[in-house]
Amino acid sequence: MLNYNTEKDNLVPITQLAASVEFKPTKKDFSRKNYLSIQYIEASKLSSSKDFQRLINGAFIRSAKVFKPNLVRPLYVFERPDGKLSVADGQHETILAILYTIQGSKIEMPCQVHIHPKDFTLQECIDAEAEVFKDLNFNRTNATVIARLRANIALNDPSALKTEAKLNDMGVHIEGLGYSEGVEVSGYRKLMEAYKEYGLENVCKAIDLYQTNQKDKLSTFWNDVDKPLVGGLIAGLAALYNLLPFLGNGDKNYALTCYIDNFLKNEKPLGKKSLLSDIGGDSQSILFARRVVASCNTLVGHKIITKKNGDPLQVNIEEDIMVKAGLGDPSNPSHKK
């Protein structure tokens, strides 16, 4: 009797995943002959091209501390007209094998060898190898942050499990990770920065406002309800909610709250000439909040935002308050945290 629980293995047939990709590609005939056979070649016979190969990552090699042959994929190697062997993909694996095994340079590496035509020039060889290097390193799907996080959750890594709990607490999921029945978010890093910087309560308020504006038929700029929520925009909204307590309970707080509740939905949040346009990096949420506050101050000054009885507000959200809330001008060194 098997100890293995087949019903809970979460295995999905690859054919089913392929069918889920909705497009009609042009198909070509294929046989096993199209694969390159695997040869085992001594590391001392392999070379790396300075013309296109990346620099050696010494820190990575030192931190590896061991060579793991069970994780090695076949190297992609070109045989040039003079018989020399150029590694297009796999130089770091080879260096690890040389440095961390007793066999050293005598160790044999699994290689898929493509033979250049005998009449190829040096430049033609370099061009062909560089194109394959680009295809292997830039045109394939590498493990994303979320993919690595998902793997670590499967391994019950404590840090990964805490992150999953945070996503559940926020009521969101990213690429299926987190609260499956919650709202989908894109931009993991920005979302988690907002959680760390502004706290769960403010992030949840930001998500609620984001969704409210999306569902408001009058909020034409926010109505892309089919799209995931953008992490950078959530962070900016959370920064605004984090600012409110610094304004006290008087007219300044009232003015910004009024702007958030009644005027922000008329602003374009994404795309060209929007609240997030031309800003990014670590200061994105700060710059977003500063734009909103500047707009709020303008509407107060033009008597568009007034007291409930219609009387003008004699307030302005000053820079010193922004600095106290951690929203000072990022270009001013004295305002950086």
Image: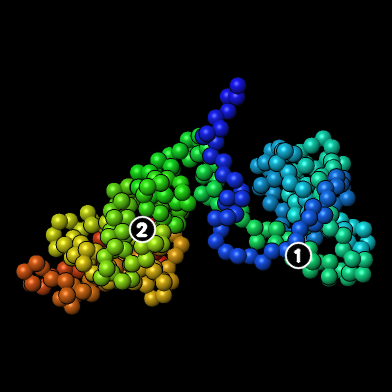
Residue at the location (83% across, 70% down)? 124
Residue at the location (37% across, 72% down)? 274
Q: Secondary structure at mark 2?
A: helix
Residue at the location (44% across, 59% down)? 282
Q: Earlier in the sequence, mark 2 or mark 1?
A: 1
Q: Quadrant of the N terminus?
A: top right
Mark 2 = which residue? Answer: 234
Give the answer, above or below, for where 228 lies relative to 268: above
Q: How many numbered marks does the figure carry?
A: 2
Which labelled disc corresponds to residue 130?
Answer: 1
Quadrant in the rendering for residue 305? bottom left
Q: Secondary structure at mark 1?
A: helix
Residue 325 shows in the view? no
**Residue extending farthest left:** 309
The image position of residue 177, as x and y in percent, is: 46, 46
The image position of residue 250, as x and y in percent, is: 13, 59
**Residue extending farthest bottom:** 302
Mark-to-mark CA distance, 2 and 1: 41 Å
Q: Is residue 117 left or right of residue 166?
A: right
- Kindly identify the amino acid type of the residue bearing the numbered disc 2: Ile
Label 2: how many Cα within 10 Å (few below 14, some 14–19, many 20+): many
Quadrant in the rendering for residue 85? bottom right
Residue 224 shows in the view? yes
Give the answer, above or below, for where 12 lies relative to 47: above
Q: Contact (CB < 8 A) between labels 2 and 1?
A: no
Give the answer, above or below, for where 132 lies relative to 151: below
- Kindly identify the amino acid type of the residue bearing the numbered disc 1: Ala
Residue at the location (77% across, 48% down)? 74
Q: Nearer the viewer, residue 329 or 275?
A: 275
The image position of residue 181, as x and y in percent, is: 37, 47
Label 1: how many Cα within 10 Å (few below 14, some 14–19, many 20+): some
